Amino acid sequence: MSVERESPWGLMAVADAHVHFFSHGFFSALAAQKREVTREVTPESAPELTIEAIGEQLGWHMPGAEPQQLAAAWVHELDRHGVARAGLIASVPGDEASVAAAARAHPDRFFAYSMVDPVRGWNPDGLEEIDVACLFPAMHRYPIQSEEARHVFEWASRKGRAVLVHCGVLSVGVRKKLGLESRFDMRFSNPIDLHAVALEFASVPIIIPHFGAGYFREALMVADLCPNVYLDTSSSNQWMRYQESHLDLRQVFRRALDVVGPKRLLFGTDSSFFPRGWHHQIFDAQATALYELGLSEDDARSIFQENLLRILAR
Ligand SMILES: [Zn+2]
């Protein structure tokens, strides 16, 4: 049975290229960081912060210890919205086993993405089941041209996998809500720095999320010069506020279609936590904008599903 969703073009199979898999491991890592901070302030009376306490603080549902439970919750959620597939991102380095388990349990529904920190160490053996290695150079503070980062591209090239490189403005809502510092460094966030790397690893699909998250022009430039660079459309694209002249979603898509074309845009939402679940408003807004631009049904199918399936096919 194929899962389809109502769209302006009629029923359509949709693959979401960008969903965060906030696993038990993810929240445990945040709880550990929060405990560190608290201990520095009040060394004696630091309370043990459990992930249940985090859930209470955020008003979010906390996942059980087994990633299969969260995977089942996402399958249920995608079914509810008529979404066929999603790329699930393990959102702290070292949590790749959670998304691997989800993809193993539901291979027709999920792709496995994992955050990799090439500087503080990563284990390629742990990435056997990972489709996309996600690099966050500004978060982990390294240049994308560094030797360490190149090893990840070499791995992707050898294994036939993709690499996502987060560029532009990065704000992690859950860290803010928990009062965790985010000592990121935006010097490492310009898509231009990807140019030579993308040319060198021409066989590796490279995904820049959120249209470059503020570096729209630069993301378009790199994508124009490198046919292996893809843009994901995910999130509410708040970066549009930084544009010198007003841009709306329709204009963003117009320019992206003009420069990059419909074969290298990947629909995504940036969904992450429950109870919100799948962020259907993002789909609605993007589908409406593209429909109003006169996008053909064929091109819509490319953007909303086929491009992702094509680049992640193994
Ligand atoms: Zn994201």
Image: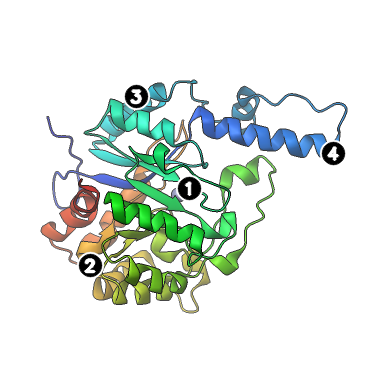
Q: Residues within 10 Å of mark 4 (few under 14, many from 20)?
A: few
Q: Which residue is mark 3?
A: 72
Picture residue at 65% right of the left edge, 25% below the top: 53
Which numbered disc flags the more N-terminal residue, 2 or 4? 4
Picture residue at 62% right of the left edge, 57% below the top: 184
Cα distance between the residues tagged 4 and 3: 39 Å
Q: Which is more toward the observer, 104 or 220?
A: 104
Q: Nearer the viewer, mark 2 or mark 4?
A: 4
Q: Which is more toward the observer, 179 or 48?
A: 48
Where in the figure is residue 177, as x and y percent of width and height? Answer: 64, 42
Where in the figure is residue 39, as x and y percent of width and height? Answer: 80, 34
Query: Are the two marked residues, 3 and 1, in contact with CB atoms closer than 8 angstroms?
Result: no
Q: Residues within 10 Å of mark 1 (few under 14, many from 20)?
A: many
Q: Nearer the viewer, mark 2 or mark 3?
A: 3
Query: Are the two marked residues, 4 and 3, in contact with CB atoms closer than 8 angstroms?
Result: no
Q: Amino acid at mark 3?
A: Ala
Q: Nearer the viewer, mark 1 or mark 4?
A: 1
Cα distance between the residues tagged 2 and 1: 37 Å
User: Can residue 24 be seen here?
Assistant: yes
Numbered badge on residue 293: 2
Q: Nearer the viewer, mark 2 or mark 1?
A: 1
